[in-house]
Amino acid sequence: MSNVLTGFFRWVCRLGLGGIFLYSGYVKLRSPLEFAAAVAGYQLLPAGAIYPVARYFPYLEVALGLLLLLGWRLRTWGVAASALILFFIAIMALTHLRGIEADCGCFGAGEKISGLTLARDSLLLVPALFLAWGHRLRRRGQSCVPAA
């Protein structure tokens, strides 16, 4: 992959993921009770932990979104985004496999966990992984270029 193409794809991944995390966190901060209901629907946390998670977790998403948009230490924040998306996929898949009809809570209320939400989050993992480990593609590409 050429350096220009790699750089452009990194820029698209950074802005896309940063915007998604920023928007997702903003929606949850705007409606913490709706997000708390979504968190409760997963049936994974004790009752006393639901509201604190729903109240403070969106700040993590907003911070991650801002850090991705800034472009500072992209590998670090790409790893963090990859881990967070994998966490989301795991808890949604676990809830779905348990037969629980819960709201995803990803972008507000009203979206049930389904194969589609799992596929969407799985697709979001691709740019996050590229930000985390895409530098290895560039190194391989550079080592294959003959010296002039």
Image (cartoon, rainbow, N blue to C red):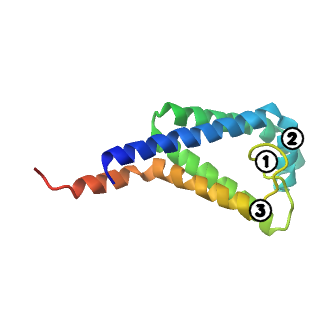
Looking at marks 2 and 1 on the same chain, the residue that comes earlier in the sequence is marked by 2
Which one is closest to the eye, mark 3 or mark 2? Answer: 3
In this image, 92 relative to 51: left or right?
A: left
- Marks 2/1 in contact by CB < 8 Å: the verdict is yes
Quarter of image, res 146: bottom left
CA separation in Å, label 1 and label 3: 12 Å
Amino acid at dot 2: Glu
Q: Which of the numbered marks, if any, corresponds to residue 129?
A: none
Residue 107 in the image: x percent, y percent?
75, 44
Please say if 120 is above or below 67: below
CA separation in Å, label 3 and label 2: 19 Å
Q: For mark 1, what is the residue?
A: 105
Looking at marks 3 and 2 on the same chain, the residue that comes earlier in the sequence is marked by 2
Looking at marks 1 and 3 on the same chain, the residue that comes earlier in the sequence is marked by 1
- Judge whether residue 82 can be spotted in this image: yes
Please say if 17 is above or below 92: above
Amino acid at dot 1: Gly
Residue 28 in the image: x percent, y percent?
77, 37
Quarter of image, res 57: top right
Query: Residue sitting at 83 percent across and 53 percent down?
Result: 103
Mark 2 is surrounded, within 10 Å at the Cα level, by few (under 14), some (14 to 19) or many (20 or more) other residues, namely: some
CA separation in Å, label 2 and label 1: 8 Å
In this image, 120 relative to 9: left or right?
A: right
Q: Secondary structure at mark 2?
A: helix
Amino acid at dot 3: Ser
Residue 145 in the image: x percent, y percent?
20, 55
Q: For mark 3, what is the residue?
A: 114
Mark 1 is surrounded, within 10 Å at the Cα level, by few (under 14), some (14 to 19) or many (20 or more) other residues, namely: many
- Judge whether residue 90 can be spotted in this image: no
Q: For mark 2, what is the residue?
A: 34
Residue 33 in the image: x percent, y percent?
88, 38
Query: Residue sitting at 81 percent across and 52 percent down?
Result: 111
